[in-house]
Amino acid sequence: MTVDHRQHHLDSVRAALSVAVYPLQWLVDLPVSTGQWFRESLATRRDLQEENASLRTQQLVLNTQLQKLESLEAENMRLRALLDSSFQVGKRPMLIAELLSVDMDPYRHQVEINKGSLDRLYEGQPLLDSRGIMGQVIHVGPFSATAMLITDPSHAIPVQINRTGLRTVALGTGSIDRLDLPHIPTNADVRVGDLLVSSGLGGRFPPGYPVAEVVSVEQDPGNTFSKVAARPRANLDRSREVLLVWPPDMAAPTSLPQPQPPAAADKAGGKPAP
């Protein structure tokens, strides 16, 4: 032991003995290490399964929230567009309403909105969206109202061509994307792409508001009138929120922030609310 401690002459012998004894050590430790390996494998599989289930649940929740955020973003964009369109209406009182239902009768283009006589709605009241005139209210209940779209076969709206000022009447055809202008003479100056705006005649619709855009003009010298078709500017089959307007001298409930001109908003250190 003294020689080994001081001179290290038995290191090679000790190394040889450790090599010979190692198989015995491995056999003795085999049951313990095997059991530990099984426990770790089962625990790792269980942890992975639980983690996978938790991640799937989180993914489902986040996807649902994302869909809601997308819906809210689209609604916010529509409301902003409606607020921007309120500047064009001028100082008329206005109110935002939501669609409750759509008449599925193919021969009637009517919708129901969630405002009624308690909100001071009246029959004949104009209905607009962010792009143009949609129609008018035809029936008013206490909590809801029915509106007829401009494409209904029984609807007519006085319009004028914005480029030339020519006045005419746009008739509903029963097709959601088509209006007819049957009373335009063949020698009248009307072109594809002309914007039709409300003329204000009759006092029902605010003047100068977009109604439709001319998409086809057929002029036959043998006929007195041209065949002119137009496409409505309003999103009649997609809008969920609509804008109701009152004449300037009529009071109405306020559900919209009072619009300010951009200059006034900048001067106040802010901008119109969405």
Image (spheres, helix red, strand yellow):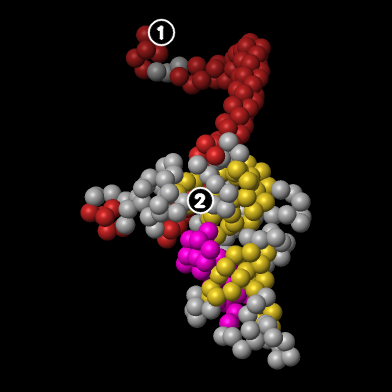
Q: Where residue 193 sits in the image (x, y, percent)?
A: 57, 77
Please indicate, yes or no, whether residue 70 appears anywhere in the rendered image: no
Residue 43 % position (x, y): 62, 19
Asked which quadrant contains residue 215, the reply is: bottom right
- Image coordinates of residue 82 in percent, x first then y, are 47, 53
> Farthest residue toward the right?
106
Circle 1: is it few (<14), some (14-19), or many (20+) Cα within 10 Å?
few
Outermost residue toward the bottom in this view = 221
- Report the front residue among 16 and 153: 153
Q: Quadrant of the N terminus?
A: top left
* Residue, disc 1: 1
- Residue 243 disc label: 2
At x 45%, y 16%, the residue is: 10
User: Was residue 211 drawn as part of the magenta stretch in this picture?
Assistant: yes
Q: In this picture, is 135 found above or below 1?
A: below
Q: Using residue 34 as the reference point, say whether residue 199 is left or right of it.
A: left
